[in-house]
Image: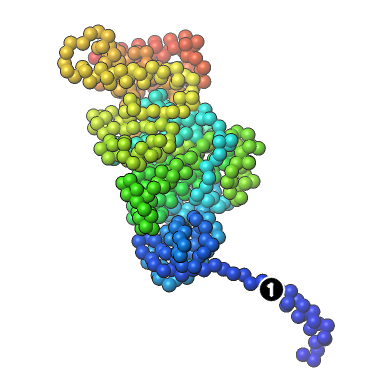
Amino acid sequence: MAGVKPDEISNILKEQLSNVKTVSELEEVGTVLQVGDGIARIYGLRNVQYGELVEFESGVKAIALNLEEDNVGVVLMGAANSVAEGDTVRRTKVIASIKVGEGVLGRVVDTLGQPIDGKGPIVGETFEMPLERKAPGVLYREPVAEPLQTGIKAIDAMIPIGRGQRELIIGDRQTGKTAVAIDTIINQKEFYDAGEPVYCIYVASGQKASTIAQIAKTLEENGAMPYTTIVAATASDPAPLVFYSPFAGAAIGEFFRDQGKSALIVYDDLSKQAVAYREVSLLLKRPPGREAYPGDVFYLHSRLLERAAKINANDGIAQQMNDIPDSIRHMVKGGGSLTALPIIETQEGDVSAYIPTNVISITDGQIFLESNLFNSGVRPAINVGISVSRVGGSAQIKSMKEVSGTLKLDQASYRELEAFSKFGSDLDAATKAVLDKGERNVEMLKQAQFSPLSVEKQVAIIFLGANNLMKDVAVEKIKDFEADYLSQLETRFPEDLAKLKTVKKLKKDPELMDVMKNLAKEVAGNYGA
């Protein structure tokens, strides 16, 4: 010490005192009162917010859902056995969110955004996206005016879907609801290859793990995984993870939508999600309503589905959009869209049950799949009579709108007359003509799974059906005729086939119509009765 000068001592003291914090930093903590069934009640977190993440000593996170006078009810987002009564809980002051980036494409993640496909961590930059977020206001939306091609003839022709639309897929179990959604995802490969991708998110809520693995394998085999993310909450996962899984999917979809890109999200299915929400609500002792669902189950689905939208193309307006997360504010562009295909399972075709009626009232139309049609070999088993798209018609390409204009009416007339014809009375020529045409159109609209058709090929084949150009083809040979016709059209008249995508009015292009008619007559000669 003898060698230390007094001025040096004062300098050392000043340096040390400069780092002293005079204001105490307080961390709000609470104590676990009760835990069980994926629910914990906590005392002491007086200022916690609804939807805020809280963290236990063990590292398990939970989301605050019930804010009561003397305690807070939270749902655990992990194993309940690592949480015990008396454990300390601290606030994170962060509303529940997941990390999203381009790296989630091609991956299978859980509700918390953690990869579960064994391919290592998510690569690239990630951004915090909240699970719960206000839907874009009216000012920031645009009408649906751009088609989202599903590749399924019956849908693209009669129940078209536009980008930014919410179209419900509804039907009993094992009627092909998931198949329609997966085909739609596979069909987006055409746009991905063309450099105009539609990013797809498939949310599996409460599905069997084996089913999810099979879907991932199917998408991989069909080259759809590079532009797809699967959000998986299996049947064995805790109920909170199942009920939050669609919100995690919506957050990923919004990440792409807010950058001016197109995204498609499939919720498979919201019936199981509603059951998980009912379980959580009853455990939190919320009062039950109709079918024991809580009173806010309608709001659960409406705030989720309203997040699907077509955003205003003006960048300046889009950047003023409500509730933009700070993490992506600098990346926001206009013109993006998020299209939602929620799936609802009915019991015995009962669409008047609580959850089906709720979701029907929120969405912009429904694709109704029927067990009787499925069992009789009509696949996809779409009941055209009660299926409807409230906005997609304005998003159809011009040629498809023209050729499919009468198809839905024709099929409705056919279904009506078909019922009467079963009585076996003699039919007049006009009735017989309607039945023959309808029967061939039903065959024409059948489509194998995982074989979506490009829109120009759909227009070519529906043109034949609408104009009754298959009347000389035997009903059982319609599929063979269709394959042969499209193959010859593609090889012999590729320019005319490509033109079907862009032509404004077919009737003003008689040469194009003659090509299709003459080829149909030529090919039909090989498939007569």
- Coordinates of residue 246 in the picture (x, y in percent): 43, 47
Q: Is residue 80 above or below residue 50?
A: below
- Coordinates of residue 524 in the picture (x, y in percent): 32, 14
The answer to whether residue 23 is left or right of residue 456 is right
The answer to whether residue 499 is left or right of residue 349 is right
Amino acid beneath label 1: Thr
Question: Which residue sits at x=44%, y=30%?
Answer: 161
> Helix, strand, or loop for circle 1?
loop
Closer to the camera, 177 or 230? 177
Closer to the camera, 511 or 240? 240
Q: How many marks?
A: 1
Q: Is residue 291 above or below residue 490?
A: below
Q: Is residue 97 above or below residue 457?
A: below
- Coordinates of residue 170 in the picture (x, y in percent): 34, 36
Q: Residue furthest bottom?
A: 2
Q: Is residue 223 visible?
A: no
Question: Which residue sits at x=73%, y=77%?
Answer: 17
Q: Is residue 408 visible?
A: yes
**What quarter of the picture does the C terminus occupy?**
top left
The residue that label 1 is drawn on is: 22
